[in-house]
Amino acid sequence: MEQHRPLADREGGGWAAMAGTHDDGTGAAPGEPVAKEGADRSDAPESTGTLDAGAEEADPAEIPGAPGAADAPKASGAPAAPATPTAPERAAPGRPEPEPDPSPARPWVRPLLISVTALAVMAVLTLATIVQSPSAKAGSDTGPTADTTVPTATTTASATQSTPPATATTASSATATAAQTTTSPDAAVTTAVRALGVSGHVSVAVTDADGGAAATYETGATSYDTASIVKVDILATLLLQDQHAGTRLTAAQRTLATAMIERSDNDAALDLWRTIGRSAGLTAANKTFGLDHTVGGEGDLWGLTQTTASDQIALLQAVFDSGSPLSASSRAYASGLMRSVIDGERWGVSAADSDGSGYALKNGWLQRSATGLWDINSIGEVTYDGHRLLVSVLSSGQKSEQGGIDQVERVARTAAQAYVDAA
């Protein structure tokens, strides 16, 4: 694509003098912070509890007093039962009977000791059985509560089972986070264009011509000189005025309109600027089109009209959108001229047209006499990856005309790609 324009068209004869009567009006250097979303999550490790309990069964033969014990000793302190006296030891007749032993033997002592010991053994065996049972390890509430060991083990096992699986929680959280951090077209365009490291001031807006929110990016300055892109606004105003009056463009007006759009002729633009009523006529039509931040240039200085990238999207919608205040025939006429610009002006947003299906555009450029810096602008309709897009790129403070053109093309292409990828 050629990136040169006819030497005869430097935004029209007399532009240097015209631009020199106004200050540059550029804003402060760009720079705004980017909010980063994100959230860090950490999952607590899952705790596990293992109950390790057991008891060895005691051999009854080793327990004193247990049934079947061999030679079980008597309980300490218990007197031995007296032996049965033999016949010679019995008292002779007439002799008094001997006094009974004041501490007779207590035959119930041994059975009592045996019973207590047996109960102790049974208690140990029962406790070991309960601890080893599956119900105790699973946290059953049916086990004995007198022993503190069993409730402690039960509590640990229950706490282990009540802990939710960490893997499921992590996967669910990751899905929710991914859904919350989906990049919007506006954020995508801002990130992509900022990464280019643009020079001067640049503002870009892009939207889907078939419906969708506009995404914008600005580097500080929001209002820019239109230069020759205002010629589309002049034509749209002329067409709207004719619609309201019930008239049509004359042959002379059509000739001027063709020269103004296709060749960017400044003399033709000045004639039609005066026809629409200069700034007042432009402002009245822009209220209908929805351009809320565009201010017409003073007197005949139509090229110093101030506008924003978002307002230029509204102007493009007036030309290409079926819901426009302009009639279908008026829209077809204006868009047809924009598709027929001469080869020397087929630069700018046309760089974002990836499908080769044709594009429509209008460019503007102006060197400010006070600073020697350039305003480079481009607006139009392109098709990127099957999406019909409306794109406007405005810039000021460019060190050279060609450098400004190159930057506008990079911004247009980058913004279109980011918008489509995020849509």
Image: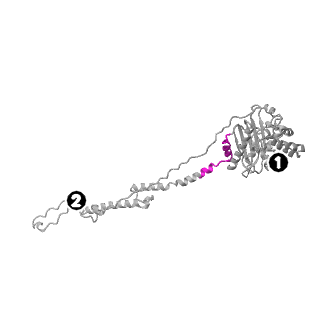
Query: Which dot marks residue 113?
Result: none
Q: In which quarter of the image is residue 310?
A: top right
Q: Where is residue 84 in the image (x, y as percent from the top left)?
A: 16, 66
Tell me the SS state at disc 2: loop
Quarter location, residue 376: top right
* Image quarter of residue 72: bottom left
108 to the left or right of 358: left
Tell me, yes or no, whether the highlighted magenta stretch contains residue 355.
Answer: no
The answer for how far apart the CA atoms under marks 1 and 2 are is 128 Å
Decide which of tag 1 and tag 2 comes sooner along the chain. Answer: 2
Above or below for 381 versus 150: above
Q: Bounds of the magenta span? A: 175-197
Of the pair 124 and 145, the residue shown nearer to us = 124
Task: State left or right for residue 80 relative to residue 128.
Answer: left
Q: Position of residue 102 (x, y in %)?
A: 18, 59
Q: What secondary structure is found at the residue carrying circle 1? A: helix
Horizontal relation, residue 68 to residue 147: left or right: left
In this orientation, which residue lies closer to the viewer: 309 or 11? 11
Residue 291 locus on image (x, y percent): 77, 42
In the image, residue 289 sits, relative to residue 171, either above or below, namely above
* Label at residue 336: 1
Q: Which residue is drawn at 35% across and 61% down?
A: 125
In terms of secondary structure, what is the magenta stretch mainly? helix
Disc 2: which residue: 78
Residue at left 85%, top 42%? 259
Snapshot colouring = one colour
Residue type, numbered disc 1: Gly
> Label 1: how many residues lie within 10 Å, few (<14), some (14-19) or many (20+)?
some
Q: Residue lying farthest right?
A: 251
